Each structure stands twice: as C-alpha cells, then as structure tokens.
Image (cartoon, coloured by chain):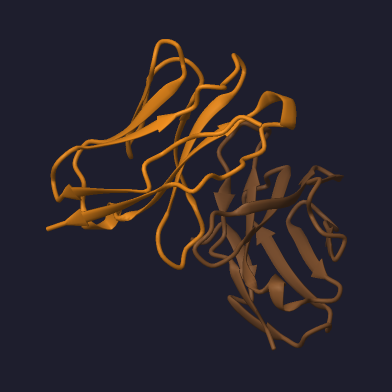
Chain colours: A orange, B brown
Amino acid sequence: DAKTTQPNSMESNEEEPVHLPCNHSTISGTDYIHWYRQLPSQGPEYVIHGLTSNVNNRMASLAIAEDRKSSTLILHRATLRDAAVYYCILSLSNSGYALNFGKGTSLLVTP
Amino acid sequence: DAMVIQNPRYQVTQFGKPVTLSCSQTLNHNVMYWYQQKSSQAPKLLFHYYDKDFNNEADTPDNFQSRRPNTSFCFLDIRSPGLGDAAMYLCATSRDPPQPQHFGDGTRLSIL
C-alpha cells in the first residue's frame, strides 16, 4: 500500500512562494502523483497531478524528483484564500487509480 | 455553476433509521465516487461506479450501499446508521482515471 509522507502543518506569508513537500518512496513506475486541497466546510479541490515530468497549471506547479520518490507542490504567490489542507496522493495503477487520502499538510497563510 | 451537487447539505437521522444521500452531476463523467470524512480526518473512499460497474472498497461496511440509476445520479444508502456513521459524505466524479476528480461540497450526516 503505497503511502505519502507530508508535514502536518506549514506556515507562509501572504504573497510569498510556498513549497509543500511530499515523500512517496514506494511509488511504482505507473503510479500518478496527485495534489488536492480542502478548504473548511468544502469538498476537496483538484490542484495538479503528474507522472514523471514537472507540471504547471494556473493554480500551481508540481516538481517531481528524478527518482520520483518525492515531489513538491509550489504555490507561486500565496494568498489568504490558499489556506487549506493540502493532500499529496498516489493513485496506484494496480487499484484503478483510486485516491487514498493521507493526513495532508495544513497550510496557514498570514498577512 | 455547481457541477457536482449533493443534497441535502445537512441530514439528521435517528439511530437505526435508513437514510439516503444523493449526488447529481452535470459533467457527464463516467465515474462516480463516494467518500466518508469524519471530523479532523482525511476523506476515505467507500466505493465507486465505473459506468455501471460497482467497485466496493474492501473495508467498507456492509451497512453502506449505493445505487446509480443513470449517468447523472448516484445514491448512498445507509441501512441502519450507527453513531459511528456520523460524518461528512462526499461525492466526486471523473472521466477515466487518473483524470482529476471533481468533488461536491458534501452532506453532513448527524445521528441522533
């Protein structure tokens, strides 16, 4: 059962970049790395996902280590609205790419 | 515009009284998921439908069942709710995995 390891919490100042780390040392070659975030009283929201190469979208960037055993979600300029729990999730090819959420990182953004 | 709609947002039922939660989607996605999220915990996958094919997670209690009458709708039935079933229930949809999942805002279930 591939798992991810994330810090319980992180803090950032508003308008500064945030780097959220994730370790997934048991990842296999066909497992995807997903990031979702969840604001209070809302359902999770998709942020980004990738397989091997770094990925960019309007919300964030995903940097994947060359050995794929770790990745970093990068928020380029944190806002107060980015305060949420960020989940790094491996979707496993041998389980139909189901999402098994871990504990996530609670991000606090301060003005 | 809400794309995954869960009704109601809050549901109260009595211990042992069957309850049904509903989810509808306007995305025409072929996969629909149900998650349970207890207080201060991460969401936990209960089961999902891949088109009409039902896939149950190994540790989902027998008390939980689901129906998907058509592409747009999916229901979660709890036959005899216990106090431990009080939680937020989240519905999500996606195209063929590993495409991103779109979540509704959940139904918070309370058991009296």
The residue depicted at 84 percent of the width and 79 percent of the height is B18
In the image: residue A11, left or right of residue B54? left
Toward the top, the furthest residue is A66
Q: Is residue A101 above or below residue A41?
A: above
x, y (%) of residue A102?
Answer: 53, 44
x, y (%) of residue B41?
Answer: 53, 59
Q: Is residue B22 above or below residue B48?
A: below
In the image: residue A63, left or right of residue A97? left
x, y (%) of residue A76?
Answer: 22, 36
The residue depicted at 78 percent of the width and 46 percent of the height is B57
The residue depicted at 55 percent of the width and 38 percent of the height is B100
Q: Quadrant of the C terminus of chain B?
A: bottom right
Of residues A46 and B36, which is closer to you in this image?
B36
| Total labels drawn | 0
Displayed quadrant of residue B89:
bottom right
Q: Is residue B5 above or below residue B57?
A: below
In the image: residue B96, left or right of residue A55? right
x, y (%) of residue A80?
Answer: 22, 57
